[in-house]
Amino acid sequence: MYPRTLAIDYGDRRIGLAVSDLLGITAQPVGYLTVNGDRDALRQLTGYVKEYQIQKFVLGLPKNMDGSEGSRVEKTREFARKLQEDFPEITVEYYDERMTTIVAQRALIGMNVRKKEGKKDMLSAAIILQGYLETHPNG
């Protein structure tokens, strides 16, 4: 059995979440958090860490289309530092999330899902995690 990984699509107000299956092959969206700051987000994440016995976090790194890093990347890295402080036993890694939001939006439109907020964040987290799992097959 592989350690379970929790993917985080980090945002200021909503954070999408997805978790790996027990074999570390597929990603499943598990929810989203509506947050009021990073402290609130970290508090809410505790339940997911316990429920799924998380041993790794993967944060989507929102690089610009040209590969450069903007202010969102720095905010994400700062959140990762806070994650590492609150959960020192859990590894934190990044995955380039360029295009995941667009892919998630198109998928939801294709499925004729009307209310997309929250669902888009969950689906984005699942896309981030699936990409990570495919490029890191042994965790």
Image (cartoon, rainbow, N blue to C red):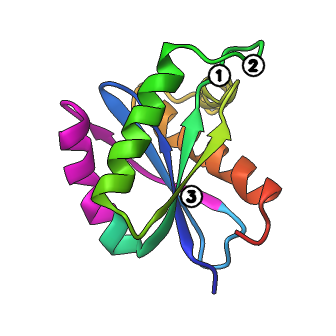
Q: Nearer the viewer, mark 1 or mark 3?
A: 1
Question: What is the crowding at mark 3: few (fewer than 14 residues within 10 Å), some, or many (at least 20)?
Answer: some
User: For the N terminus, which image quadrant?
Assistant: bottom right
Which residues fall within the magenta stretch?
Answer: 27-48
- Which numbered disc covers residue 67? 2
- Which numbered disc covers residue 133? none
- Secondary element under disc 1, as helix, strand or loop, is loop
Q: Quadrant of residue 2?
A: bottom right
- Which numbered disc covers residue 28? 3
Q: Amino acid at mark 3?
A: Gln
Locate residue 121 relative to residue 2 in the image: left or right. left
The Cα atoms of the two marked residues, 1 and 3, are separated by: 23 Å
| Label 1 sits on residue | 63
Question: What is the crowding at mark 2: few (fewer than 14 residues within 10 Å), some, or many (at least 20)?
Answer: few
Q: Amino acid at mark 1?
A: Lys
Give the residue at x 62% y 18%.
69
Give the residue at x 18% y 30%.
36
Answer whether residue 46 is magenta in the image. Answer: yes
In the rendered structure, are the residues bearing label 2 and label 1 in contact, judged by CB atoms less than 8 Å apart? yes
Locate residue 44 relative to residue 121 in the image: left or right. left
Q: Quadrant of residue 47?
A: bottom left
The Cα atoms of the two marked residues, 3 and 2, are separated by: 27 Å
